[in-house]
Amino acid sequence: MTRKRNRTPSLKQIKALQLINQGYSKHRAMLEAGYSEGSSRHPKVNLMNSKAVASVLESMKSELVDSGLTGKYMAKKFQEWLEAKKIVTSPTEEDKVLPDYDVQIKAYDRWEKRMGEPSGGGNGLKRKVTFEEFVTGEEKEIDASP
């Protein structure tokens, strides 16, 4: 008879997850939660692969989706943040609606951190192809002289 293990996370696991959620690195969160230096060096092995932690994370994911926090919702939110505007008031002039560049830049930085550089950003571009090369399929000799 196989014994079913308890899938309830330990107090250390809960504390580590809370600290990670607050922005701590996995290593630091595990140290703060009471894990040893050795265990905290391998958080993916010791914490994130735990069946109890995986169960908690899956439960949280399901609750987020059930509450409407889906990928589609977040895409719309990022678009809203990237197009953020602010109202600038002045006692002598009419109110103006201007782009809120601080919010837009922070949204872009957060998006870039999660997703990487947007496609078409030139990443991996070795050189541009001329129209003639595109049509004929033959590479053109590039003159490197100024």
Image (tube, helix red, strand yellow):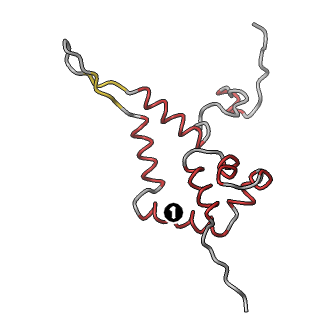
Residue at image point 66% right, 69% down: 51
3 or 143, which lies in front? 3
115 or 129, which lies in front? 115
Where residue 53 appears, x then y in whole percent? 62, 64
Where residue 33 appears, x then y in whole percent? 65, 54
- State left or right for residue 105 relative to residue 68: right
Seen as rendered, the residue at the extreme front is 34
Mark 1 lies on residue: 60
Image quadrant in which you'd find residue 129: top right
- State left or right for residue 80 relative to residue 94: right
Residue at image point 51% right, 63% down: 60
Residue at image point 59% right, 43% down: 115
Image quadrant in which you'd find residue 85: top left
Image quadrant in which you'd find residue 42: bottom right
Of the residues shown, which amino acid type is indicated by label 1? Met
Q: Secondary structure at mark 1?
A: helix
- State left or right for residue 14 relative to residue 96: right
